[in-house]
Amino acid sequence: MTMGFARLSSLLLAVFVAASTSAFAEVRIRNDQGGSINQYFARYQSIRDSGDRVVIDGPCLSACTLVLGILPSDRVCATEGAKLGFHAAWRPNPLGGRTLAVDQTRRMMDIYPAHVRRWISRNGGLSSEMVFVQGRALDFMVRRCQRREQARLDY
């Protein structure tokens, strides 16, 4: 009787371990135009805390690029179709236009890892104009996804 219980316990433990190691999802970014820095910061912290991975598989612009600094680099990858776009943060002004938000731009720069900050600086810094990186140049900023890394969730 105890032998049967021991085998059952071992089997249940093996099933639990197998289930817990495959519980992480992959989130795919396909066409993200960005938005509120605060919302992206909270979203990426949640993804980071969940253990999920992120696959950038298309445009990831503006606040979307904060993923590079909030998630560990080994949990973010880019496909051949990835494209990152960086620009300074802005706020709407009373006249319906945009005013650069120096404090939020500084916050974004503080979030990016050092190698991303260096690339931004070498390419003119953050301004009202979007600066893009894609293709082979992107390989220096974020690791290339392996073929086996297929996303199961759409972002």
Image: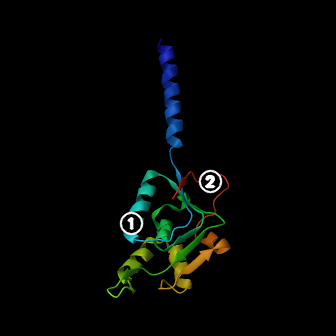
Give residue 139's position: percent from left, percent from top: 63, 69
As helix, strand or loop, the secondary structure at mark 2 comes to loop
Instruction: Quote the CA–CA distance across marks 2 and 1.
Output: 26 Å
Picture residue at 51% right of the left edge, 15% below the top:
3
Up/down of 134 relative to 18, above or below = below
Q: Nearer the viewer, residue 60 or 74?
A: 60
User: Looking at numbered disc 2 in the image, what kind of residue is underneath it?
Assistant: Glu
Q: Earlier in the sequence, mark 2 or mark 1?
A: 1
Give residue 57's position: percent from left, percent from top: 60, 63
Residue lying at the far front in this picture: please name it: 96
Up/down of 24 relative to 99, above or below = above
As helix, strand or loop, the secondary structure at mark 1 comes to helix
Picture residue at 62% right of the left edge, 53% below the top:
150
Find disc 2 in the rendering and name its residue.
Answer: 149
Instruction: Please tell me the numbered disc located at residue 39.
Output: 1
Up/down of 66 relative to 19, above or below = below
Give residue 85's position: percent from left, percent from top: 54, 76
